[in-house]
Image (tube, rainbow, N blue to C red):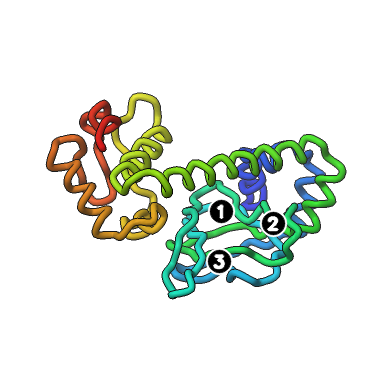
Amino acid sequence: MGPHRVHQQILRSHHLFEPLNEEQLDELLAASQLVNLDKGEQLFQQGEPAHAFYFVISGCMKIFRLTPDGQEKIFEIIGDRQTFAEAMILMDTPNYVASATAVAPTQLYRFSKTAYMRLLQANQGLTFALLGKLCIRLHQRLNEIETLSLKNATHRVVRYLLTELMKMPAGSRCLELPVAKQLVAGQLSIQPETFSRIIHRLEAEGIIGIDGRQIDVLDRLRLEQFE
């Protein structure tokens, strides 16, 4: 099976593309580009014209903005088979509101905003899929705002670990940090040394075990109650 067909199958697993029939998916792919990025390579900068959205085939991207004093605020880490910048399809602003850089060698598809809009107009199921995706993102951002505003750093780390654990197969107690600890700390809006201090405190109390990026949750109940 050629790479094109393999990628079609991968895209079909995502709800933003699943409603498309073969002809529509071929039309979208014909207006797309396959992009390969090295670690540290920038895809787009905040303020650049937003003509496309993206689907990660493999690798990892960080979505971030720079604060007025030059500090990097990470909004999201995007991994395999995830999309980003799709909200730009419906936004009035013509430019990207954040920047995107690869944190590992990454392969992704760049999809034309114009081509996808044509398909939206012809496919009601696709329209609802996009709205559903954007609603999920909105709830995630609201939860993050609440956590960042009202909870302390320890709570943020605990919630993050439990969220990552929920992504694992049922019954699993092991998780692997998707990116370096420094990037996770940035996503949680805490200093890297604060993140490390909390992680090592959890380890010292026998709640988790640490082996590089792999974390073994030894006592989930205590982790859930830990503040």
Residue in view at x 50 percent, y 62 percent: 64
Q: Is residue 70 left or right of residue 140?
A: left
Q: Which residue is mark 3?
A: 99
Write the residue at 66% across / 52% down.
86
- In this view, the residue in front, 224 or 207, is 224
- What element does badge 3 sit on? strand
Q: Position of residue 170 (x, y in %)?
A: 39, 25
Nearest to the eye among marks 1 and 3: give it: 3
Q: Quadrant of the C terminus?
A: top left
Give the mark nearest the N terminus, 1 or 2. 1
Amino acid type at circle 2 is Met
Q: Residue at x 57, y 64 (%)?
A: 98
The residue carrying mark 1 is: 56
Q: Nearer the viewer, mark 1 or mark 2?
A: 2
- Residue neighbourhood size for the residue with mark 2, other residues' Cα within 10 Å, grouped as few (<14), some (14–19), many (≥20): some
Q: Amino acid at mark 3?
A: Ser
- Left or right: residue 183 compared with residue 31: left
Residues packed near mark 3 inside 10 Å, few (<14), some (14 to 19) or many (20 plus): many
Image-based side of 64 in relation to 44, left or right:
left
Q: Position of residue 137 (x, y in %)?
A: 58, 44
* Disc 2 target residue: 88
Residue 40 locus on image (x, y percent): 45, 70
- Name the kind of residue labelled 1 in the image: Val
The single residue placed furthest to the right in the displayed view is 122
Q: Residue at x 26, y 42 (%)?
A: 215
Local secondary structure at mark 1: strand
Q: CA distance from mark 2 to mark 3?
A: 13 Å
Quadrant housing residue 109: bottom right
